[in-house]
Image (spheres, rainbow, N blue to C red):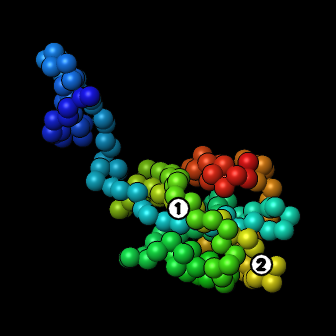
Amino acid sequence: MSHYFPFYLSHNLIYIRAKNDRNSGHFFLLNLHLSESTMGKIYRQAVMAVIINNESKVLIGYSPRDKSYKFPQGGLEGEEDLITGIQRELKEELNYHLFHDHILEVYEEKVRYPFPPDCHPVYMGQELSIVKIKHRSEAQTIPQDDEFDELLWISPKDITAYNYEYRSDAYQKALLICGLI
């Protein structure tokens, strides 16, 4: 077991000093480079919806703002819980009314992706909780704002055929967590 000592910051490098458990007197320095754009930033807590229809396809949308495809998702507001957050996001983005009996699972495991450099003044990326939802055939999926301008139902195995930019690895992992690929 190693013992960790306080770290210090100098010229955008963090130095951490650790001594091994054999008390040999050897110390190790771990240098982590921090860029100006990520220093002091955190991951935004968010929630994403993996909505599955009767054909086992998932709903994605093209975002003209982000110039890429993405799942319905968004940041949590204040002390908002995951279900309230995803209900709000689906209503705001798609006029989709989510009922509790259509929630298949809320996963403990999260996925995250970093934002492109200098993309956001406060957050370095998003950490997403995943809510798997069974689509109601009578439910509306109509884009409500500039979040989406095109919606598609795709096979989960085809996820890599769409441009997800910096979200690609996180989305693939989310579909794995959901047992869809």
Dot 1: within a 10 Å radius of its alpha carbon, few (fewer than 14), some, or many (20 or more) residues? many
Q: Left or right: where does residue 148 sit relative to residue 48?
A: right
User: In terms of sequence position, does the residue under pointer 1 or pointer 2 come before the other?
Assistant: 1
Q: Are marks 1 and 2 in contact (CB under 8 Å)?
A: no
Residue under pointer 1: 129
Q: CA distance from mark 1 to mark 2?
A: 21 Å
* Residue type at the position of mark 2: Arg
Q: Quadrant of residue 130?
A: bottom right
| Residue furthest out toward the top | 24
* Residue type at the position of mark 1: Ser
Decide if residue 92 is in sight here.
yes
Which secondary structure lies at badge 1? Answer: strand
Q: Left or right: where does residue 160 sit relative to residue 18?
A: right
Q: Is residue 168 above or below residue 140?
A: above
Q: How many marks?
A: 2
Residue under pointer 2: 136
x 51%, y 71%: residue: 82
Q: Quadrant of residue 7?
A: top left
| Residue furthest out toward the right | 55
x 35%, y 62%: residue: 122
Q: Quadrant of residue 8?
A: top left
